[in-house]
Amino acid sequence: MTAPVRDGDTRRPRAFRTFRRSAKSRRTGDAPGPGARRLGSHGIPGAGALRQSGQLMALAATTVRDVFRRPFQWRELIEQFWFVASVTILPAALVSIPFGAVIALQVGSLAQQLGAQSFTGGASVLAVIQQASPLIVALLIAGAGGSAICADLGSRKIREELDAMEVMGVSPVQRLIVPRVLATMLVAVFLNGLVSVVGTAGGYFFNVIVQHGTPGAYLSSFSALAQLPDLYISEFKALVFGFIAGIVAAYRGLHPKGGPKGVGDAVNQSVVITFLLLFLVNVVLTAIYLQLVPQKGA
């Protein structure tokens, strides 16, 4: 129980003081008091996640719009392209070899049990090109290039460089985010071709050398089952995955919380969010492709 307020006494009950602070903060735009924070914590479940999703979509739309604004930052695009490519080319090539080997060994063993060794090459190559290659590229870009982009933008944000750019009339999205997103998309497309070639070569080597398959059967099954739209969907997936990795990294870099420590947390969050979105979008794109494009030999 709160003590009654006597005449001439300037003290007020605690609830009254909390309400006064909350009302004052709403008028002045300051941070709400503890009572207001406790009240806001019982709001709509998932409202924060929904709001951040909307902000992420708004940033993606703004980035697409600013691609066509002039002047275009060609120098920034080239620098970011070279940086992202330099940190992802070697890991992508090294990771694609064991991926192709594992797929070839597993598919070859299963095909041998079923008596369908002649289809080992086609199944292995399709798995590498359609599924493994775009995901490998996207995960590496998100983990290496995306984390660096998020850290760079986050450090600029806490140093108030982005606010200074807005004061001078320079759009941070057009100046910084558009070149970085385009760089991740272009690198993803080029790396996807590299990973597809290296993974296919690794699968061929392990199937022919380790499992004693015949080169003719491997190549003939590949030509019998694979088709050109398989490469198209692979490149399209890489393009979309690169866009997602760049947008998520840029968004988390623009919204760090808690100073330098918040930048590190934003980098971790950007990688995790990108991974989740990549697997979800991959399922959607694969389902649409299988429904729209008839498979060869079906």
Image (tube, rainbow, N blue to C red):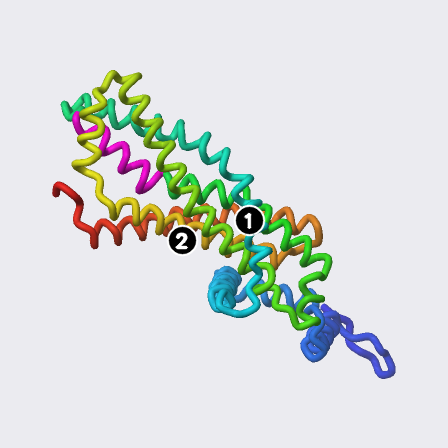
Task: Read off the magenta span.
Answer: 118-132
Q: Secondary structure at mark 1?
A: helix
| Callout 1 amino acid | Gln
User: Between disc 2 and disc 1, whose residue precedes?
Assistant: 2
Principal SS element in the magenta part? Answer: helix
Q: Residue furthest right?
A: 8
| Callout 2 amino acid | Val
Which residue: 23% across, 23% down? 215
The answer to which of 203 and 289 lies nearer the viewer is: 203
Q: Would residue 50 be seen by someone viewing this image from the given angle? A: no
Q: Which residue is mark 1?
A: 269
- Where, quadrant-wise, is the N terminus in this rendering? bottom right
Q: Which residue is mark 2?
A: 240
Q: Quadrant of residue 99?
A: top left
Q: Secondary structure at mark 2?
A: helix
Q: In x, y percent, where is residue 35?
A: 67, 67
**Residue 123 in magenta?**
yes
Which residue: 22% across, 43% down? 227
**Residue 259 in magenta?**
no
Q: Which mark is residue 216?
A: none
Q: Given this view, does label 2 or label 1 mark the residue nearer the observer?
A: 2
Q: How many marks?
A: 2
Q: In x, y percent, where is residue 84?
A: 54, 45
Q: Residue furthest left?
A: 298
Q: In x, y percent, where is residue 260?
A: 70, 50
